[in-house]
Amino acid sequence: MATIERTDPSDTLMFSESSVPALLRHTWIQTQRLLVRWVRDPITLLETLIVPCLLLLMLDIVVGSPIEKFSGHSALYGSVPMVTLVGALSGTVASGVMLGRERDAGLLARLWVLPVHRASGLAARIVAEGCRILAGTIIIICFATALGFRFRQGPLAAFAMLWIPVLFGLAFATMVTAIAVFTAKSTLVEAIAILSSLLMFFSTGFVPLGAYPEWIQPVVRHQPMSVAVDTMRALAEGGPLAGPLAQTLLWSFGAIAVFALPAGYGYRRASRR
């Protein structure tokens, strides 16, 4: 005679696809999928690690000495923060293009019909972006130490500095995701690279603020990358911290607040196609 095994209601809740444990488990699985795919993608590695390191080396060789003579400080304390931010933005654009390709290939739709938590796909992309940006920042700073970059404000300030590119990159990634899931053309996502280039060339990390014409200095001083660079410079070398940090938080959380809802709605809409 067959026996019926009685199950605990708490076990059913734990393994429900809409439960919190399922969200954590499915997010971790999809995060691993994204990280493995990015590691195997040469474009993502090129834009996240190789290009920023080469850019940092070029800036140190070409403009390092003139900037040091002009400002009296090592140019590395501006160029290293700037390059870490550029690496975060460049990798985000590459992952945005990949997201568009996954949508067009129907991968998002296939994942949607599986018994997985609905929020795990977008949550995994956020976690994976944070891991990618943090790893890239650490590698770039390790490369910078060979060029003479040093932390002069202690280990706590150094630890805090590592998370500025993560916050800045996640804010940018939210915008890129919102655009990638709504547009059918990856060229529109790739056009965001132009914006990141403008932010780089007109930032205090590229050259000191006094080197720009006076009429554009207010724009350069308060644009998102400049305030993030100034925050990281203060954490590494010293200097005013409260003002740049407050503006960095305002820019980052403001972008997340504006683009988070469109990104979530667009991801759900793209997955159900």
Image (cartoon, grey):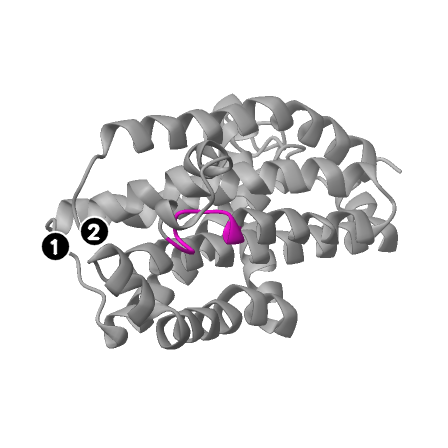
Badge 2: residue crowd in 10 Å (few <14, some 14–19, many ≥20): many
Q: Is residue 204 magenta?
A: yes
The residue carrying mark 1 is 152
> Is any part of residue 129 visible from this angle?
yes
Residue at the spot 45% in from the left edge and 54% down from the top edge: 133
Label pair 2/1, CB-CB below 8 angstroms: yes
Q: Residue at x 43, y 56 (%)?
A: 206
**Quadrant in which the N terminus appears:** top right
Q: Which residue is mark 2?
A: 236
Whichever of callouts 2 and 1 sits on the residue coming sooner in the sequence is 1
Q: Quadrant of the C terminus?
A: top right
User: Which residue is at 60% across, 66% downward?
Assistant: 44
Three-letter code, disc 1: Arg
Query: Residue 145, located in which quarter of the rendered image?
Result: bottom left
Instruction: Give the residues in magenta.
Output: 200-207
Q: Residues within 10 Å of mark 1 (few under 14, many from 20)?
A: few
The answer for how far apart the CA atoms under marks 2 and 1 are is: 6 Å
Give percent across and percent down for residue 15: 56, 34
